[in-house]
Image (cartoon, rainbow, N blue to C red):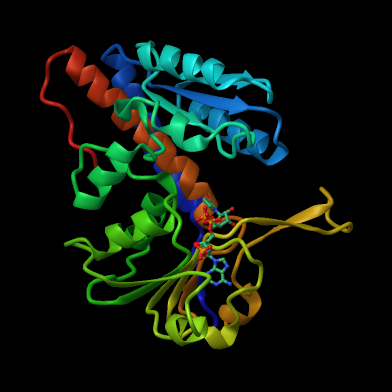
């Protein structure tokens, strides 16, 4: 059986078109949604991600501001930048691009971002809101993107067994709480480096999500026939024959697993494009809430 390939790029294009329509509406009401990205240093992969985010903002009619600080910036300089953006009424969403240089502890800076502007959903206040199912926070973009793919691709989660490989705060833990919540109603297993017999767990999955960063970790014999497989992994693998000298690989052996699964996301073009689309959506939600606060309307409830 050859799996249906889930075209995350196409779904993301639809969401970005919907986002552009929401931005036009907010603009007509007098608010231009604004996203600020703080980048410290010159990590090449981070620069690529940041460029994609700012380009997507412009395409949706939003304002974006890139604040690039030198790699040797002090903690006080970064705190000052974040405080300035927290106070700026033209900025509704802000993110601090990770990884930071080793002398800057990310936890301190993620906690400095105002929870109302934390469109990455990494502030402990928003982590807690997501965990208790409070819709007034922000859910990180990648797990929200996977939930949106499940909805739009009509993949049933109710009563299904979802197995997530990885236990990060950015992807796997928030995804586990979204999947097990009333509504999706999945039964969730989280696996990690210390899981004994990983294959025994992955073979039980109706929905398998892999967020590890190890190309080829999931082979065909580790997947239950008919499962829906979401590959979050993004790893640059050197390939002198490739135009850029490297290829982007996921965690799943795509050729083998697509013969077993019923649906599968490719890498690239699967989960990745959804992340940026959901970041735009979070920023628009932040702008809508700020607009409604300013105009003393009942705040919009986040999706
Ligand atoms: P992470 O913080 O990089 O952690 C990786 C996780 O994988 C850890 O929980 C680790 O377990 C687990 N792991 C490592 N080796 C394993 C093994 N052999 N068996 C089972 N579990 C194993 O996770 P992340 O931030 O979620 O990133 C994961 C991947 O997704 C990376 O490739 C990243 O680039 C990619 N990513 C993609 C997007 C996107 O938009 N497409 C967004 C975010 C991340 P321990 O906790 O025990 O160490």
Residue 56 % position (x, y): 52, 32
Q: Is residue 226 visible?
A: no
Q: Is residue 123 above or below residue 175?
A: above
The residue sitting at the right extreme is: 240
Residue 97: image location, x then y, percent: 55, 34
The number of discs equals: 0
Residue 139: quarter of image: top left
Quadrant in the rendering for residue 281? top left
Q: Is residue 117 visible?
A: yes
Residue 77, compared with residue 55, is above or below; it is: above
**Which quadrant of the figure contains the C terminus?**
top left
Q: Is residue 280 left or right of residue 250?
A: left
Task: Tell which residue pokes out farthest to the front in this image.
Answer: 103
Give the residue displayed 65% in from the left and 77% down from the top: 255
Ligand 1 - quadrant of the structure image: bottom right
**Residue lying at 54% horizontally and 25% vertically, measured from the top left:** 38
Expressed as whole percent of the image width and height from the top left, the position of residue 195 reads 47, 77
40 vs 19, left or right, is right
Q: Position of residue 119 (x, y in %)?
A: 38, 34
Q: Is residue 68 above or below residue 165?
A: above
The residue nearer to you, when weighing 190 against 228, is 190
Image position of 228 (left or right of 131):
right
290 shown above or below 163: above
Residue displayed at 45% across by 31% down: 108
Q: Is residue 234 left or right of residue 114?
A: right
């Amino acid at each position: 059986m050859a799996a249906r390939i889930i075209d995350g790029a196409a779904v993301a294009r639809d969401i970005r078109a919907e986002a552009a329509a929401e931005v036009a509406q907010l603009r007509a009401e007098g608010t231009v949604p604004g996203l600020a990205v703080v980048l410290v240093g010159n990590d090449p992969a981070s620069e690529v991600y940041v460029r994609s985010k700012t380009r997507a903002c412009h395409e949706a009619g939003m304002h974006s501001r890139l604040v690039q600080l030198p790699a040797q910036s002090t903690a006080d300089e970064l705190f000052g930048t974040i405080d300035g953006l927290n106070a700026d009424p033209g900025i509704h969403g802000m993110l601090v691009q990770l990884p930071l240089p080793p002398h800057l502890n990310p936890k301190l800076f993620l906690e400095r971002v105002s929870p109302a502007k934390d469109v990455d959903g990494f502030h402990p206040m928003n982590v807690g809101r997501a965990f208790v199912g409070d819709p007034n926070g922000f859910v990180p973009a990648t797990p929200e993107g996977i939930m949106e793919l499940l909805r739009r691709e009509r993949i049933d989660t109710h009563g299904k067994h979802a197995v997530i490989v990885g236990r990060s705060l950015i992807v796997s833990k928030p995804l586990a709480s979204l999947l097990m919540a009333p509504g999706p109603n999945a039964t969730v297993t989280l696996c990690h480096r210390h899981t004994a017999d990983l294959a025994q767990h992955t073979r039980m999955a109706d929905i398998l999500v892999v967020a590890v960063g190890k190309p080829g970790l999931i082979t065909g014999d580790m997947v239950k026939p008919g499962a829906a497989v979401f590959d979050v992994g993004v790893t640059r693998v050197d390939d002198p024959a490739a135009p850029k000298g490297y290829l982007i690989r996921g965690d799943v052996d795509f050729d083998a697993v697509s013969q077993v699964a019923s649906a599968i996301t490719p890498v690239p073009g699967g989960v990745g494009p959804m992340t940026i689309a959901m970041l735009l959506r979070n920023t628009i939600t932040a702008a809508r809430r700020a607009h409604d606060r300013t105009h003393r309307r009942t705040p919009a409830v986040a999706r």
